[in-house]
Amino acid sequence: MKMLFLAGLVILIIVASAVIVTIGQVPMTVAQVYGTVFSKLWPGLFQVDPLVSHVVWKIRLPLIVGAIMAGSGLGICGCVMQTVLKNPMASPFTLGISSGAHFGVSIAAVFGVSIMGGPYLLVGNAFVCALLCSGCIIALSMIRGATSETLVLAGIAVNYLFQALNELLNYIATDEQRALMSYWGMGSLGDLNWRSILFMGVGSIVCLVLLYVKIWDLNLMTVGDESAQSMGVNPQRTRLFVMVVASLLVSTIVAFIGVIGFIGLIAPHIGRIVIGNDHRYLLPASCGIGASLLLIANAVATNLLGSSVIPTGLVMSILGVPLFLYLILRGKRREYWA
């Protein structure tokens, strides 16, 4: 059942990607898309329309690859955060990491102060401030010990702090600066290109490998810190390690696509309901569910209003609220946190 569900997620992602790449303002068939891809790998094999080739390689394929990577990363981050914090509401969005990244963009927009220049002016600020937010959460938790309760409370406090700072900068910003801050805060995949995907991909792969190394520790921590410690796992050290790695992964993602909520919150819940709490299967399931949700949200955002593209994060929030309420209210919902 578990392997069948994971295989179904892979098929869903492939089918969704094939459908998404063919729809838009420049209509094209699946055959044209495959012909374009194969002609790039083996030049001269197919006759390709230059317009179709440009749209596929420069716009739609980067968007699809970026959506899969970002959705997978946010899904797995939400999963591990909920596990080590033993809190079903833990996610990159609710712990304030996304708000920290948004604050970095606001500084660049209002004051022109940036860590990096050129096309990565906003990205550098978002990445550094997201890591700063994560560091604040971990540092506050270490004052009285890295328990799950102090990490969650620290995250909530930091989240409100950065939201207030964002509102302050929004108050003093010009209309043009305010528009940039608002657009980035709603989250969008439209600015992704192969270079940004390369940066995001390298960071994601490294962090995913580090998180997968801790699969057995995560399984043991689901039964409680005392039981995990009796089996040779250091709960505090594992919790800090997972939070640092997950924060780094989230920072890498939101630095390029902006603030997108609910994926890290919903994907792990769906995975636990369907396949249980074994992280050998739950982590891949959270990746697949997160990627599927972001692909669906992006398809709706791109095609709902025809020529106008809605920010993906806005659509994800609209779709995520009723889905999350359904998961909460469904009669067969199970609780996995002691």
Image (tube, helix red, strand yellow):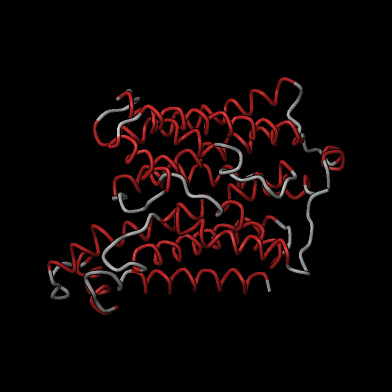
Looking at the image, which residue is at 45% across and 31% down?
103
Of the pair 190 and 307, the residue shown nearer to us: 307
- From the viewer's perspective, tell me whether residue 228 is left or right of residue 28: right
Placement of 111 over or under 93, stated as above or below: above
Of the pair 148 and 220, the residue shown nearer to us: 148
Looking at the image, which residue is at 73% across and 44% down?
217
Where is residue 222 drawn, in percent x and y? Answer: 78, 48
Looking at the image, which residue is at 78% across and 69% down?
332
Q: Is residue 281 visible?
A: no
Of the pair 154 and 68, the residue shown nearer to us: 154
Where is residue 125 drawn, in percent x and y? Answer: 39, 30
Where is residue 322 drawn, in percent x and y? Answer: 60, 63
In this rendering, the count of numbered labels is 0
User: Farthest top residue?
Assistant: 143
The N terminus - image quarter: bottom right
Looking at the image, which residue is at 67% across and 59% down?
269
Residue 60 quadrant: bottom left
Where is residue 293 drawn, in percent x and y? Answer: 51, 62
Placement of 337 over or under 60, stated as above or below: above
- From the viewer's perspective, tell me whether residue 69 is left or right of residue 148: left
Q: Is residue 304 visible?
A: yes
